[in-house]
Image (cartoon, rainbow, N blue to C red):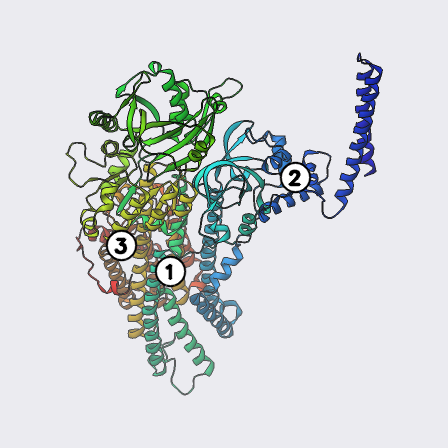
Amino acid sequence: MASKLKNSTKVYYGGIQSVLLAISTSPITKSQRKWRVACIVIYVSLSMAKRVVSSKAKVRSSPPHAVLEIESFLDDDDDDDDAVMDQARLAEMIKAKNLDGFGGIAAVAKLLSTNLESGIDGDEEDLMRRRVDFGSNTYVRAKPKGLVYFVVEAFRDTTILILLACAALSLAFGIREHGGKEGWYEGGSIFVAVFLVVAVSAASNFRQERQFDKLSKISNNIKIGVVRQGRRQHVSIFDAVVGDVVFLNTGDQIPADGLFVEGHSFQVDESSMTGESDHVEVDSKRHPFLLSGSKVADGYGKMVVVSVGMDTAWGEMMSSITRDSNEQTPLQERLNRLTSTIGKVGLAVAFFVLLVMLIRYFTGNTEDENGLKEFNGVDRDLNDVFNSVLRIISTAVTIVVVAIPEGLPLAVTLTLAYSMKRMMADQAMVRKLSACETMGSATVICTDKTGTLTLNQMKVTKFCLGGKEIRQDSIAHNLRELFYQGVAFNTTGSIYKPKSGNAVEYSGSPTEKAILSWAVEDLGMDVEKLKQSYTVLHVETFNSDKKRSGVSLRSDIQNCSYVHWKGAAEMVLAMCSSYYQHTGEIKAMSKDKMTEFENIIQGMAASSLRCIAFACKEIQYESTSNEITISQNNLTEENLTLLGIVGMKDPCRSGAKKAIESCKFAGVAIKMITGDNIFTAKAIATECGILDANQHVASGEVVEGAEFRNYTDEERRLKIKNIKVMARSSPLDKLLMVRCLKQAGEVVAVTGDGTNDAPALKEADVGLSMGIQGTEVAKESSDIVILDDNFSSVATVLLWGRCVYNNIQKFIQFQLTVNVAALVINFIAAVSAGDVPLTAVQLLWVNLIMDTLGALALATERPTKELMHRPPVGRTEPLITNIMWRNLLPQALYQIAVLLFLQFRGRQIFEVNEQVKNTLIFNTFVLCQIFNEFNARSLEKQNVFKGIHRNKLFVGIIGVTIVLQFVMVEFLKKFADTVSLNLWQWGICVAFAAVSWPIGWVMKLVPVLDKPVLNYLRMLHL
């Protein structure tokens, strides 16, 4: 403190010296000089006392007044402890919702060096200082699950535990019987196989966890509007700092704790924080407190940030939440049921094989390597009997392991993770895993128009006043002033004019920006000048039901006020009883004139223009009581005077028509739901290809929201499939359509961007929100975020959804072929010969090919255009289709026939011993799976090699599998219980396996029934 006081004294003495020098050179009288010296002495004494009091206050545990603590932010010499205390006081102010002792919102802003109009300085030094003193707007995330967690989870699987127990027993008795050098082979191989399956499964889940973490960071990186140095700009929510002035609109998430500065009709949904569902009204006087994480339910306004990051209740809550990424998708649940069913069948077969082999052993029907009976009941060593029984049990357990397709859930995880990553590159961020597969079954897509089918780049191209299209320079002065009022004050956008003289910058929605730029550039509007002449009394924000917004103003010059409305042209027109001519003269609205205006609106709409009308009403008042009434009551909606109508062009996206044609060709119906009038909707729908341009629009294809709403339930059920366009719709109309479509058995995908779209997005099977124009409420209600707001990306999501479903079906076909073949071969061999031709090690190796390498190879196939040539799957089609049965049964029967042929006739025909015969069986069986893996690449195409060069992972896995198989046969002889094969014998194995290709090619020519033949699959809910 002494050093600080010394420095402070130097500062003050330096100030005195400069003042005295100024006094000595000033032409003043002696008495004046004495008074000045006295004032200086008093000033210095008070300042020194203030410094001492401030220093002592910092030593005390609690400050006597909040303002003294906050002043530390403005003093660069203060230490970090002061800043921390300031931070805590500010955070406590919001949590306690108590401004006492802070002097009000303006005082807090001043203490934070914030200008409520132009914001903070916002340069790097200022931002850094605020982050150091008050922290950053981030929270400490819960530590993500590590690889060890997923390894432990994998080891909890019942099948894995059974395998480990079997491996331990096999290892123990193997070493006891054959010694440590060779006795570990079988048990060790089981351990290796288990660890490989666990490692792949854990690594896949761990990778998915990391991928979800990355997507979560991207999803949480919201863009917010702030003003810095007078310029409105968009920054990341994580870059918001204490003192920032933030713009808030309906649907926005409040980025940090703060105080409401100004706005209109502002309501907040604090249910995420308080659990209360009722919306909270916020104003700058009675309740200015805003909590981070809340959503703006209605209105618009500005706030000043007071607390960020971990100093907010939202930050504390989010840091304690651990996200669970191990959600089970519907397809995974269906596959788990399939796995369980196949496992039960395998268990029954294994139990029967165990029973038959034990009976054969104890009845003396089995022989050892020397051709002697293994069990004669008299002179057999008990250890030999025990080892033989253990070998039989081990074989039965291995059959169970091969029968259980535990690779199915792994394949789903792999293909979902792979598709999520690829979809991100294709401008689609998946928020819920189940959406990937569900989108592949979609039969209907309900899409918005603005920004999705169009570019959302509005520009005013037509202006009609008094029933005529006129030039802007021919408008009367008084009429021009009314347009200025209606545009400048009835908007959620803003204008920024750089001091450097660069181009004017416009902020807000595309519609607001188009109108603002038109008023400034064509009409010569000066917003700053207008703000000095008028005061806003009341604002009615845009409502998706009324489709208009309004404002009332008081003129600071004249003794009158004005009410202005802006919105959907035909709706605003219906509120008018008179209209302005371009000369500024007001005329009554006759029926003929009303019809003329309606025709003008229809003509604009038919040209794909969005029509916006302006109307106003001037109200004279004698006293302030009239003004109070105007400001407090709802704005008048009757007897308005029409100012004019503007037509804005929003061009269709270049790829929208092609994407819609692709979806329609794929059997997916496209329905456009828009708030525009019916003529604009028709024009855009025709331009995009939703309606046929060469045919007359059929009755019932285009409806308005009110008409659809008033249908009876039966009428909606009958007409819903024919509707292609719904105009002038509200969010509730969209929700009603989604429900009707789902009741009709359709799988519905819906696009939405507004807060009011949230119910429809949640109700739909797949909710698709817009990443650019979408509100945070819409994004949180959706399953997938379309990052570029483009319908082409929606079509891409559909393609990827079908790819996920198709890849899973490919793997099921491949897996079941092996399951059926392995079970039948072992069953027949065990019953007839008392032994199985494939050892535990060999069966586990085949299992490894199926569950891991096969899943990796088939789950990562990229989507092809052929996927969009098929009808949608829908809700009722079984997972295992007739096409899959047609493909897998002939392959399984062929493999069974070949292996049984080798089992019973191989020694005689090829003149080989028992060991070579068994090696031929094992090698042929593995090679059959490798060749059949090519067949599985396509369920219907005969050319299974098309595009194979693009899937390097598939080619690599096939190559690795072949090399490993060669090593298993030729080098790991004792481990795999094989012997070396000569070139001729390898050729025999390859020849037998290669027949899989022509069989697959021929079988794909066989037609299948549309209805599932195996109806019992439905009973099993597959």
Q: Secondary structure at mark 1?
A: helix
Where residue 133 is drawn, which disc sits there?
2
- Residue 894 sits in quarter: bottom left
Q: Estimate the spatial distance between the alpha carbons at disc 1 and disc 2, rounded to whole Å.
A: 62 Å
- The label nearer to you, 3 versus 2, is 2
| Front-most of residues 443 and 956 | 443
- The amino acid beneath tag 3 is Arg
Q: Residue furthest bottom?
A: 378
- The Cα–Cα distance between marks 3 and 1, rounded to whole angstroms, is 34 Å
Residue 866 at x, y percent in the picture = 26, 43
Q: Is residue 405 left or right of residue 131?
A: left
Residue 247 in view: no
**Given the image, on which type of amino acid does mark 2 rest?**
Asp
Tag 1: residue type?
A: Val
Residue at (20% x, 27% y) in the render: 591
Q: Nearer the viewer, residue 812 or 908?
A: 812
Q: Earlier in the sequence, mark 1 or mark 2?
A: 2
Q: Which of the numbered marks, if any, corresponds to residue 846?
A: 1
Q: Nearer the viewer, residue 168 or 766?
A: 766
Q: Specify the quadrant that holds the N terminus.
A: top right
Q: Are marks 3 and 1 in contact (CB under 8 Å)?
A: no
1 vs 2, front mark: 2
- Earlier in the chain: of badge 3 and badge 1, it is 1
In the picture shown, does residue 90 fall above or below 329?
Answer: above
Give neighbour class at mark 2: few <14, some 14-19, many 20+ (Cα, 10 Å).
many
Furthest residue in direction front, as rendered: 622
Q: Which residue does the numbered mark 3 point to in the structure image?
A: 875
Counting other residues with Cα less than 10 Å from the Cα at mark 1, is it few (<14), some (14-19), or many (20 or more)? many
Which quadrant would residue 771 be assigned to in this image? top left
Which residue: 20% across, 25% down? Answer: 592
